[in-house]
Amino acid sequence: MELNSRLTEPHHLHHRCPRRFRRPHRCPRRFRRPTDALNAATTTTPNAAATAALNAAAAAALNAAAALNVAAATLNVAAAALNAAAAALNVAAAALNAAALNAAALNTLVTLNALDPVHRGEAAGRNVGEPTRRHPIAAYRLCFQHSG
């Protein structure tokens, strides 16, 4: 509240009354501000124990937040390591997929060779290009299979 410079008594601090009542002994009671007793009843007096307890609780909360931050940073590092491991596994899975595709292509070639009358003995475990009775010219082809 602002202090009226002419009237320094506590209950005359910034009272609101008509100008004809500005003298202290003529200010009606209905225009006066609440007195100091009411102000003293409404203001809170600081309690040192409560302040210390609140400070301790705030410090504990800050410590818990710091511990949570450390745990979150640790989890972030672990997540980064897991991401790297997942990337390595993805690379290995891609290599395995390529190997499986190669194996499938090789199986297709073996099947086609088994159906081919020239390479029919390959699936049975005999030499590659072994001449069969079905293909009389296979012996002639066998002469040139390593010619490059």
Image: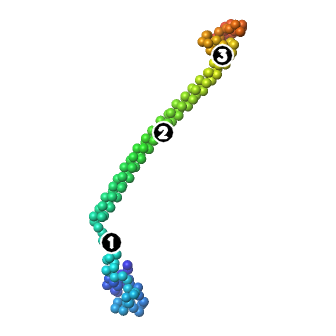
Q: Badge 3, how many Cα within 10 Å: few under 14, some, many 20+?
A: some
Q: Position of residue 133 (x, y in %)?
A: 70, 7
Residue depicted at x 54% and y 31%: 93
Q: Mark 1: which amino acid?
A: Thr
- Say if residue 64 shows up in the picture: yes
Please tell me the numbered disc located at residue 83. Answer: 2
Residue depicted at x 33% and y 79%: 38
Q: How far apart are marks 1 and 3 (CA)?
A: 100 Å
Q: Quadrant of residue 121?
A: top right
Task: Using the image, determine if residue 13 lies above or below residue 140.
Answer: below
Contact (CB < 8 A) between labels 2 and 1? no
Q: Mark 3: which amino acid?
A: Ala
Task: Using the image, determine if residue 55 lies above or below residue 32.
Answer: above
Q: Where is residue 47 in the image (x, y as percent from the top left)?
A: 29, 67
Q: Quadrant of residue 76?
A: top left
**Residue placed under numbered mark 3 in the picture:** 114
The earlier-in-sequence mark between 1 and 3 is 1
Q: Which of 119 and 26 is in front in this view?
A: 119
